[in-house]
Amino acid sequence: MKKILKIFLLTVGGLLLLLVVAAGFLLATCDNDDYGRGLVFLVDQLTDYRLELGDSCSVNLSAAPAFSTATLKIFRPGHSESLSFRNVEITLFPAALLHGHVKVKVAGLVNEKKTLSWLLPRELYALNSVEFSGLVAIGPSMLKLQKIKARGRTSRGAVLELSGRGKINDFSAAQPFSSLDFLVKVASPVSTDFAGYLPDGLPELGPVHGTLRLAARSPRDLAVKDLQLDFAAGGAMHLRVEGKIAKIPVDPRVVNSGIDLDITLKAPQTASIATLVGLPLPELGPVQISASLRGSKKASQVRNFNMSAGIDDNLRLKAAGEFEFGDFTVGGPVPLRKINLEGVFNAPAGSELLSASAEKGWKVPSSGPLAATFQLHGDGKVIRLTEFSGRIGQSNLSAALELLLAGKRPRLSGLVTVQTVYLDDIFPRLAIPLPEESEERNGDPLPVEGKTDKKSSSRSTVFFDQKPLPLLWLLRCGCDVDVDLSVARLLDAGQTEILHNLDVAVKLENNVFSLDPVSFGYEGGYVKARLLIDDDEVPSLSFAADADDLDLVQALRCVGLSSPLTGKVTLDADLHSRGKTVHELAANLGGRFEAALEEGRIPTHTLALVAVDLLGWSFNRTVMKRRYVDISCGVIGIQADQGVLTCKALLDTPNVLVTGAGSIDLGSETCDLVLNPKKKRKFWAVVTPVTMKGPLRDPDVRAIPVASAAILSGGVLLAPQFFLPAIGLNYLWEMLSKDKSGVKSPCFERLRRQ
């Protein structure tokens, strides 16, 4: 607004200087044919400006002499490009000369883009034509504007109108305004035509219309009065801004003050607000927001902020408070000086919360509501979330967080504490039932001796995706994080404790994300782990974990997975990699992974799918009555180097002992493995060593003679009595050697007997 006024007044002043020069010539000439050439010559000789007139121009030498031309080009001093005007009409009132000033009536049209770009501020570049008219009186030290009218239009039908009057003392004076009173009207089918006068980042707000009065508050300052703007996004949202701005300094380096605005926003659906703020808010129904914006030169406040969303008190979000901002700098960030906000949210048990896009949803647990209360307080240096308490079903949590604003980057730190988490409250879909304990087999018949099914058709699925990893959120976060999560107990749907003493330290600093440590305990064991992600030019990941007697089924249930295989897992892992895609991470994988499974069971029909369909083995009919096969010990050791895995494995059951070795190339997604089985009983009818070679998605499985499987490349013997000591279990061996509540480890006992 400041720029357009300044440029407009300077331009009008330059034009009127031309009119003053031309006035005497206009009265003295009676020859229309020579008028145009004479006026151009006179302006060129007596001023620094240069004129070009169109072929069609006329002069009316009546009591009020008038001049009109279809086109008028004005060349400013030092500029090669002209300002172009169309349909220019200038009427002179000679009687005013008797009083020592010139009075003229001007009208015209500007629709040339370069001229508009010079006359208008960048925020109004959407206008492609401006019509203007008015009375102008010029005295020795003043410029009086009367009956001024200007109308600008855009290609999409938006209209900006300005009408009024004013008096200007001197263009170069420090106090130019004596009086000013303009009415401004705006109407547009889209808000983006005037996006330059709206806060950055706003989406399309729909049709906009409104009025304001621009007046001279003092010789140095302007004021906006009777401001009323309405935005209506197709009936989905209505935003109204009303009020005034008491002081708008002419100096563009000085900020506005005396701001007194009332803002109201109403929407029939939360989705409209979600689009406005750019957040995936749940759909709560109608939303109402009201606030008062008050401001001075040094500070501004958002007072009486109130927000409510929802249909009734059963599904409701409410927030109220105030904000204060201070030390404004033109073109710089708006610093937060104070915040005081309280809120409450409540959704009844069993209600469904849809996202604003209505593509996904989440159902509130039937065991209880989703509710939260919070208080947010702070100043320009630190913001604190205090007295936060939340409830999800039967699970209650509390939090105390602090956002430190000082320093190069904001830093979020604090503690989230949960006494008891009910798994089906947080993840209702993860309530996966445990495998039945019955030993009797019911269901489809199993493959039996002498009968095998053909291998399933090959699949073209690629194991490792080539798409870039979604790690940009590390860069978009914009702050460092140091938050600890503490959970005393995690219970399943049957009120059985899955784990206890869960501690997670979440850190994000300089685009390095870490979970270190992650630790929790459970009946008979513990887990300690750490994860590090460095979002460098080529992202790097590292993962390390120790687990002792981890219940495989319960662990998978916590992340929404199920497993037909049950048992207690002891593992030791230390892995690292680099890459921009999952495939690159797999191809660069390095480190080790060692794990042992004890007290395990696998459904017979699942084992048959692997042993019969894939390996071509078969077993006797008597096993059909048994639902499960027990696993005394399963051990796997993997050494990874640049995506090549060197694997050694053992599976010990009461009926068969299987050893295996070989390599898997994750980069090429190929394998070269040998499995060597040894029957203990007549459980199996046909078991022979096999090789697995070729693509991971469809390996070639072939039976080989027992003698051929005795020695693999590198001299590693597959005979069971030599295999286990050669695996090199390192720390895993030490973990297995410990007594578990007085019970010896089956895997360690087998190792000890070799």
Image (spheres, grey):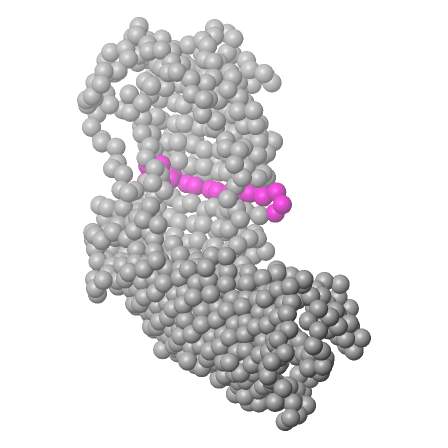
Taking depth in this image into account, of 238 and 358 the one nearest to the observer is: 238
Q: Is residue 243 left or right of residue 174?
A: left
The answer to whether residue 274 is magenta is no
Taking depth in this image into account, of 364 and 95 the one nearest to the observer is: 95
Q: Using the rendered view, name the quadrant where residue 234 is placed.
A: bottom left
The secondary structure that dominates the magenta segment is strand
Q: Where is residue 121 in the image (x, y as percent from the top left)?
A: 59, 68
Which residue is depicted at the point 77% across and 75% down? 42
Q: Can residue 652 be seen in this view?
A: yes
Q: Where is residue 644 in the image (x, y as percent from the top left)?
A: 57, 27
Q: Where is residue 12 in the image (x, y as percent from the top left)?
A: 63, 77
Q: Is residue 20 left or right of residue 609?
A: right
Which residue is depicted at the point 38% across and 68% down? 230
Taking depth in this image into account, of 347 and 1 the one nearest to the observer is: 1
The residues colored magenta run 536-555
Which residue is depicted at the point 41% across and 23% down? 651
Which residue is depicted at the point 24% across and 23% down? 627
- The answer to whether residue 196 is above or below residue 381 is above
- The answer to whether residue 461 is above or below residue 27 is above
- The answer to whether residue 745 is above or below residue 104 is above
Q: Which quadrant is home to the N terminus?
A: bottom right
